[in-house]
Image: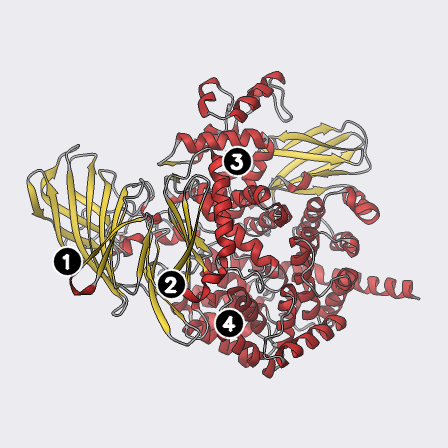
Amino acid sequence: MFPFLLVLLLLCPPSSGAQIPNQDQPKDPPIATNGQPFPWDRMRLPQTVGPLHYDLTLHPNLTTLDFTGVVRISLDVREATSTVILHAKQMQVSNVLLLGPDGARPLKVLEYPGFHQLALLSDSVLTKGRNYEVQLEFAANLSDSFHGFYKSSYRTSSGEVRVMASTQFEATFARGAFPCFDEPAFKANFTIRITREPRHIAISNMPKVKTVELPGGLLEDHFDTTVKMSTYLVAYIVSDFLSVSRTTQRGVEISIYSVPEKINQTAFALDAAVKLLDFYDDYFDIPYPLPKQDLAAIPDFQSGAMENWGLTTYRETALLFDPDKSSASDKLAITKVIAHELAHQWFGNLVTMEWWNDLWLNEGFAKFMEFISLDITYPELHVDDFFLGKCFEAMEVDSLSSSHPVSTPVENPTQIQEMFDDVSYNKGACILNMLRDFLTPEAFEIGIIRYLKRYSYQNTVNSHLWESLTDICSSDDLDVGRMRHVEFCSKRKLQSGASKWYSGDELDVKAIMDTWTLQEGFPLVTVEVKGREVRLSQERFLRADDPSLTEGFLWQIPLTYQTSASSTVHRFLLKTKTDVLYLPEEAAWVKFNVNMSGYYMVHYAGDGWDSIIKVLQHNHTALSGNDRASLIQNVFQLVGVGKVRLDTALELSLYLSRETEIMAVTQGFGELVPLYKLMEKRDMPELENQMKSFIVDLFRDLIDQQEWSDSGSVSQRVLRSYLLLFACVRNYAPCLKKATQLFNQWKDSGGTMSLPVDITMAVFMIGARTPEGWDFLFEKYRSSMQMSVKSRMKFAMAVTPLQDKLKWMMEQSLGGEVMKTQDLPDVVVSVAKNPRGYKMAWDFLRANWVTLIKKFDLGSNSVSYMVTGVTNQYSTREMLNEVRSFFDSLTEETGSKMRCIQQTYETIEDNIRWMDAHLPLLEAWLNRRSRRTTHEDL
């Protein structure tokens, strides 16, 4: 829950997942489990029959950890057929009946596990347009992974272990809970009944309408019928949770559910959910269509949260907040997650992508709306300070040749899982932000309202969005019913159609945005200024040795620029490989991509970087904080591809000694820290320590200004946590002394002394360096009910130099008894970033590979995060060969074709090239800098 730790010690964001070759057709005709030919040979279901309504009854047994059920599906027969193909995975199916005009008849069932498919064979033809139902009884074990209908458990403060059951169906796991048409375009209504013991409660997407007593003391809860929706959004939980509730302005009941002993940590989430649902109701001009919205904190949860319609589910750390123990970063992260999942109630649930290739229409929008909604509802969080980081994270993976287009073909479940990556989420959000800036916020808002209203309860593809954002003032759409739409379009008419970007007939949103969604990567714009003339050229930015990989790419780029002469933002749509524009007047400097609202990098040819360095050194506030952050990121990334000399980038970084804004400071760390992290994995302590000293010296004044308190804005508090942690990690004497003193006082008080929340990470990290301190911290971790405190303690324990503790932590996280298995990826990656643990983390990953891919699922973000997080700081041929040797030994079933493996190879090769090319330069520059500093001191 600490947003910038990944830059500091975990360094690289979770990488995207993998790309498996097209498996939509088996090599041989499919054979069912009984040896007979299976009548369908494709991964995707046929369109001949679809569902209209599911009547689903379930009986989970939390003692025997299994469940039984019966589902009756009303069919929409679109073409005459005698075969119904649907999904079921790892369950026993029995007593399958066809209920039609002629009564009930048994159906023959064939199963093809390769595609998770069942074929229901009728001895008579199902006629198009007639009413039929199929009924199937089924039984299965509760999953011991984090998906499907799975077992979760938690330990009370008295040590009792309590079991519950919850669901996670996105993307392809509903089929493991009940037979269904498990693809997003097969929308239907669901009526759900759940049998439970009286000591439990059951919740689902819709409110409970009644409870019926059954023989044997059991109860059956009946839930209202859902709206039309996709299977991946179905949800139900059986637990002993408690809840708190409030009602929105439009009468929607919001409830937060958690384990009983943590219900006192739900107030903040309840306030946030009410405020955000009211905001979205108004912003989208479409009332939330369900009578209730539950938010449930699940003790075992793989991802951050899930947008099930009417019952969103969360990790406990993503929902629970203690005003006395949670940090500013926790508040920011929790609010963003709630904003994300509630945005999905419209983007994703009401309007759903037709297939997973366009997942970004769900996830890119929800990520983007986090920032739009919180900017208005929680201005004190200053979310704008953090958006840019998402674009930098996306560029990290999008600059590799193994990246993929935002919209890319996928077929099988592993490929689908891999779509849940930085490209779909963060690049998706960044190109939407660019489009909003391009169209104006008002026009963009009107267009997306039109999109949501036009396609409610339907499925969409890319082009539907672009059409909705084109000609927003066309007369046929003035019935959107909003005053602001009419006012905006009237204003546009008064301006005679003039635009800041284009003449009216040039604007083709689809043509522009197809260049951003249908090809991978992003452009590097090279700018050369000569007087008033500015020469522009574009190419793909790629961290690879092969220039041919950059050929054939062309974007339509909404360029923005500012000059030293005025604060006016100028705009230019670059549609060609090269072009020329003319400045209104000559200027001392020109900055392109104002506030980095565009998803592209800029290289200033000629003496362009020198003029930028001058302005940063003499008057850095002439440029915005985001502009400064983007210059830092651009210049260091350009070093890696040979466009800029390393000493130019390092000279630019010197201005950071006067920087105070969070995005620029953290990006400075984000570019400089990886340099010594690479050295830590080689035997070069002298240069490594020189680099570490340089960074500490660069930020010394800012570190010294930090108070050991919780004062200031959210951004100031997050920055304080970050700086003090860095200073203590780097053994900066004043920090070390203060943190040691505070840890000893806290330990002597038995852990009861109240520490300022934002400094606890630094204090815990120093304490965990000794065996006694680590053991004390672990005992507090074990007994704590505050999720955010546990999260900080866990991180501190994972950066200890005590190798036996690191090994023990990884083993315990895998076991799941003492430390939750859901936290294992974070633990493994933290150990991998630890100079004393990186070899251990790699050995652990290899030794437990089969267990890990079974628990976390092939293609999942968790698996790719571990793969890239453990390996992305290697920079030697020996380690590359070792990594290749292991991954090349895998089979396709154990993940050999995952995209994250390709990313790993590329990243290590890029690290090797960087070190070979720049180490001598870095050493020479640091030596010159050291002599210069010594001379100045004299």
User: For the residues marked 2 and 1, what is the alpha-carbon distance in whole angstroms?
Assistant: 26 Å
The one nearer the camera, 633 or 94, is 94
Number of marks: 4
Instruction: Determine whether, in the image, residue 421 is placed left or right of residue 85.
Output: right
- Judge the density around disc 1: few (<14), some (14-19), many (≥20) Cα neighbours within 10 Å: few
Residue tagged by mark 3?
515
- Judge the density around disc 3: few (<14), some (14-19), many (≥20) Cα neighbours within 10 Å: some
User: For the residues marked 3 and 4, what is the alpha-carbon distance in whole angstroms?
Assistant: 50 Å
In the figure, residue 221 lies in which quadrant?
bottom left
Q: Amino acid at mark 1?
A: Asn
Residue tagged by mark 2?
894
Q: Secondary structure at mark 3?
A: helix
Against 558, residue 751 (above or below) is: below
The one nearer the camera, 538 or 677, is 677
Residue tagged by mark 4?
784
Residue shown at the point (58%, 49%) measured from the top left: 390
Q: Are marks 1 and 3 in contact (CB under 8 Å)?
A: no
Residue shown at the point (68%, 39%) measured from the top left: 594
**Most extreme residue toward the bottom, as rendered?**
772
Q: Secondary structure at mark 1?
A: loop
Residue shown at the point (29%, 45%) measured from the top left: 44
